[in-house]
């Protein structure tokens, strides 16, 4: 997959900080054989799924390359040329793979035709429901290049009205897609189970809303719904060049995170892994939180508090942002140490996070972890800006329907 590699620095036994590299930016035909639904952790490929597994291997190899011949594919994925030829014929018939022409350096008498995924021939719809005032959505090609954008205002919307706003946004985006749609991916705030049911999203007034089922039935398209921070982590892994052991912290109206270990998302026993916003930070009190406790991480770090600080004089602004960063560092240090993470990425308002707050987080992490074990940790801003969740939605659709990432 084409990645927007984030800048990194290496500085011995110090936590590295890197500022944001640039903040931002029709139903599928039945002939496409979808490879999988939501991928559950620990799932194994059974013998009866061997062909589907082989399809995924070939598509993944093509997706990550700039053009491969049938012989290249056989060597790359370890399948016989007969099997490769059979699979490629199916893909071409489905319009999922295209022939690019002969290899420029082909030897006389042995021409090799290069193949590629039909990257612009299909579309994916991605939604981000995490903003308190608007739902945002995009249409992309298979490379994640955004070709259409749309949004709907949702300030103060909850319950069924908020579900209706999701449908309004999808109606608009689906009608704009100029290529067959492979699937729909939706990042929702709150706790979302593996079946795409929003177990709890207090800000939207949702409890046990089967959003994935509702959308799939309405649009007759493969649909995947997941927690927005988890989707953001997927987007950062695939499009932002993040490491295989990382944590993505999203800061907005609330605070949440997605945790990736060994290249796989961590869900937790109740699908709430990464829900760090309501962890009480320190023993010195703090503002009362909406959850009823005092001093939760959200009370120190949520955007409204940071935005209020930004309007103060320079000295007060810097002090408030640095203190917020210190509280974040206190929360992250045990997680970084327990999981031996290689990278922590912050996503949220760049003007609020990239200065004193990032510095305060870095200094606190450095002071609360062992340099010998965690000194090479990278702490940085995302390079994907506000598109991080919708790009994560694209990744989940690609993985679920085509087996590529």
Image (cartoon, rainbow, N blue to C red):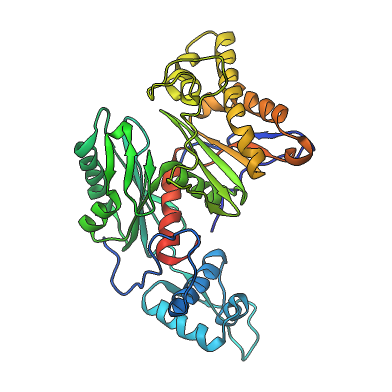
**Left or right: 306 as drawn, with respect to 28:** right
Q: Is residue 258 above or below residue 203?
A: below
> Which percent across, then down, holds residue 340?
67, 44
**Left or right: 174 as drawn, with respect to 296:** left
What is the tally of numbered marks visible in this picture?
Answer: 0
Q: Quadrant of residue 180?
A: bottom left
Relative depth, front residue between 293 and 181: 293
> Which percent across, then down, holds residue 295?
49, 19
> Which percent across, then down, holds residue 106?
63, 82
Q: Is residue 260 above or below residue 180?
A: above
Relative depth, front residue between 369 and 5: 369
- The structure residue drawn at horizontal position 43% and vertical position 21%, both measured from the top left corner, is 293
* Quadrant where the image shows the N terminus: bottom right
- The structure residue drawn at horizontal position 38% and vertical position 42%, both measured from the top left corner, is 191
Relative depth, front residue between 283 and 149: 283
> Which percent across, then down, holds residue 391?
45, 49
- The structure residue drawn at horizontal position 22% and vertical position 58%, both measured from the top left corner, is 217
Q: Quadrant of residue 282?
A: top right
């Amino acid at each position: 997959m084409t990645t927007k590699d984030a800048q990194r620095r290496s500085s011995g036994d110090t936590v590295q900080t890197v500022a944001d590299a640039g903040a931002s930016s029709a139903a599928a035909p039945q002939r496409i054989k979808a490879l999988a639904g939501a991928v559950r952790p620990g799932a194994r490929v059974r013998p009866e799924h061997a062909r589907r597994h082989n399809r995924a291997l070939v598509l993944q190899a093509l997706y990550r390359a700039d053009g491969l011949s049938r012989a290249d594919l056989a060597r790359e994925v370890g399948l016989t040329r007969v099997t490769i030829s059979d699979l490629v014929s199916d893909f071409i018939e489905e319009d999922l793979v295209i022939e690019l022409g002969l290899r420029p350096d082909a030897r006389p008498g042995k021409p090799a035709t290069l193949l590629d995924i039909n990257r612009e021939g299909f579309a994916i719809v991605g939604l981000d429901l995490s903003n308190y005032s608007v739902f945002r959505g995009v249409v992309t090609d298979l490379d994640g290049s955004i070709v259409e954008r749309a949004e709907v205002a949702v300030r103060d919307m909850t319950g069924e009205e908020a579900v209706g706003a999701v449908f309004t946004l999808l109606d608009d985006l689906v009608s704009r897609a100029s290529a067959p749609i492979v699937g729909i991916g939706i990042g929702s705030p709150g706790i979302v189970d593996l079946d795409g049911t929003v177990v709890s999203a207090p800000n939207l007034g949702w409890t046990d809303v089967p959003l994935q089922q509702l959308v799939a039935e309405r649009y007759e398209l493969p649909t995947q719904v997941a927690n927005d921070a988890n989707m953001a982590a997927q987007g950062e892994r695939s499009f932002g060049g993040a490491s295989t052991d990382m944590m993505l912290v999203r800061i907005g109206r609330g605070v949440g995170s997605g945790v990736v270990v060994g290249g796989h998302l961590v869900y937790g026993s109740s699908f709430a892994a990464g829900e760090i916003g309501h962890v009480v930070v320190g023993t010195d009190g703090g503002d009362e939180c909406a959850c009823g406790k005092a001093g939760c991480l959200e009370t120190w770090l949520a955007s409204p508090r940071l935005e209020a600080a930004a309007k103060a004089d320079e000295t007060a602004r810097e002090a408030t942002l640095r203190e917020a960063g210190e509280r974040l560092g206190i929360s992250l240090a045990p997680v970084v140490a327990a999981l031996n993470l290689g990278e922590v990425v912050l996503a949220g308002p760049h003007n609020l996070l990239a200065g004193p707050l990032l510095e305060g987080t870095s200094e606190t992490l450095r002071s609360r972890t062992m340099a010998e074990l965690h000194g090479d940790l990278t702490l940085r801003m995302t390079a994907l800006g506000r598109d991080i969740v919708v790009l994560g939605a694209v990744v989940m659709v690609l993985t679920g329907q085509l087996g590529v990432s």
